[in-house]
Amino acid sequence: MSASTVVTRFAPSPTGFLHIGGARTALFNWLFARHHGGRYLLRIDDTDKARSTGEAIDAILDGLAWLDISGDGEPHFQSEYETRHAEIAHQLLDAGHAYRCYVTPEELAKRREAAQAERRPFRITSEWRDCADVPPSPDSPNVIRIKAPRDGEAVIDDLVQGSVTVSNHEIDDFVLLRSDGTPTYMLAVVVDDHDMGVTHVIRGDDHLNNAFRQLCIIRAMSWPEPTYAHIPLIHGPDGAKLSKRHGALGVDAYRDELGILPEALNNYLLRLGWGHCDDEIIGREQAVQWFDLDHVGKSPSRFDLKKLENLNGNYLRQADDARLTALVAERRGGLDGGDLALLERAMPELKARAKDLNELAAAADFLFVSRPIALEPAAAALLEGDARSNLSRIHSALVALGDWTHDSTEAALKATAEEAGLKLGKLAQPLRAALTGKTTSPGIFDVLVLLGQGESLARIEDQMMEQA
């Protein structure tokens, strides 16, 4: 395959957010183009003017930018090329590959109802297909329809689905140009793909039937046929089509609400229907090197939020501490210089236990709460009984320390436990509750060092006073 000839495209309709399936399609197009040294283009298919919104366009562009799979060059907006689309419709009309149809919408509705009553498939059979182009009246509304082939069959050698054959009699004479002169999606897609030089159309397999219809236009125009690759859709864990009840959110929600890192989502989407041996953690450079369409499965893949969260935890542990500090600070509404520095010092311990940015931000709470700190119910339970007496022992040992380090605090606590005839946990658990207000935290000696001697002793004293 010549690297210079490969051009892919991602062409979302801006009628909503960038969903998971769309993001995976964009990623596969991006990877295929990068693997072959080609170009990956972005087109906004905004022919549906009633449903397309600027907000949706912004959400799509923002999601792609966050995943770092924006198109090469500026986005192509389909609605800006309506004149070109109409031009091709009229070329097809003039060449005898299309015709003006004067069947009214009301008559079409009656024919559709009749087909349903007779339980037969409804396909357009227009009496205007082979009729002289003479309208019922000079101002009669009409559409331009493709004159689809009636005989033979069409074959697509799909890079994912294999060889697929459809009888031409199953393809009806679909509309190219509406009665108001605007192009349909089916026409606009073909014209734009051709004009953009798209060589490989990689998209969901729900578009496979459209490919045969679009070939009618391509072959009538004697244009080069793109190579098709129709990817199976994503299903939920139960095997049903992925929906909101499965957690199918917009890409922005995975970032803003679930705290997922873009590299983790990219890695997860890559493995959702494609594989390379048993490799699970696949970085971007490796993905570009390995990606092909031969290893895209033919069966729908199943979305599993738990697997995504586990993968995200792996990427959190690998992530740069300064970057994570900035992300957590943003979730907390901003931090000043001193608090930022403290958070970054704590990050190696905090990220070891978190699976997403929300957990990471929550784990950092103990660093910034004001005294006296609030205790979670489970943490308050750890301070019942003789726990506060043990806090007094801990306080006496720690207040005498001149050197406040991980090792010195650990040695002091172990000596205190041994002297009292207690296991270390009997001291560490109430100490964690007193210092953090929680039952889980980074290692207790790391907590002591991060808080510092003064703050640590003050928090212990607050709980000792509760006893009094």
Image (cartoon, rainbow, N blue to C red):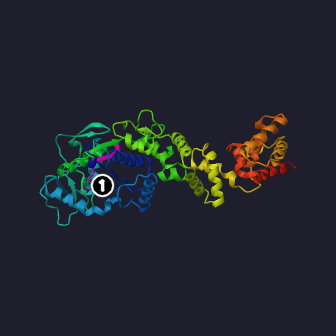
Judging depth in this view, the residue of 159 and 434 nearest the camera is: 434
The quadrant of the image that shows the N terminus is top left
Residue 120: image location, x then y, percent: 27, 41
The magenta-colored residue range is 195-206
- Please indicate whether residue 329 sits to the left or right of residue 225 in the image: right
Q: At 38% from the left edge and 49% from the top edge, which residue is drawn?
A: 26
Is 236 placed above or below 325 here? above
- Horizontally, residue 125 falls left or right of residue 409, namely left
Question: Where's residue 99, x and y in %?
Answer: 17, 55
| Residue sitting nearer the eye, 46 or 317 | 317
Residue 103: which quarter of the image? bottom left
* Residue 162 screen position, x and y as percent: 29, 36
- The outermost residue toward the bottom is 139
Which image quadrant for residue 168?
Answer: top left
User: Is 385 left, or right, of 180 in this rendering?
Assistant: right
Residue at 39 percent of width and 59 percent of height: 52
Q: Residue furthest front?
A: 403
Q: Position of residue 252 (x, y in %)?
A: 49, 53
Looking at the rendered structure, the secondary structure element under dot 1 is: helix
Type of residue at label 1? Answer: Tyr
Magenta stretch holds residue 204: yes
Q: Alpha-carbon neighbours of circle 1 within 10 Å: few (<14), some, or many (≥20)?
A: some
Q: Which residue is mark 1?
A: 185
Q: How many marks?
A: 1
Residue at 21 percent across and 42 percent down: it is: 169
Residue 417 makes an appearance in the image: yes
- Magenta stretch holds residue 247: no
Q: Report the residue at 51% width, 42% height from top.
A: 308
82 in relation to 117, above or below: below
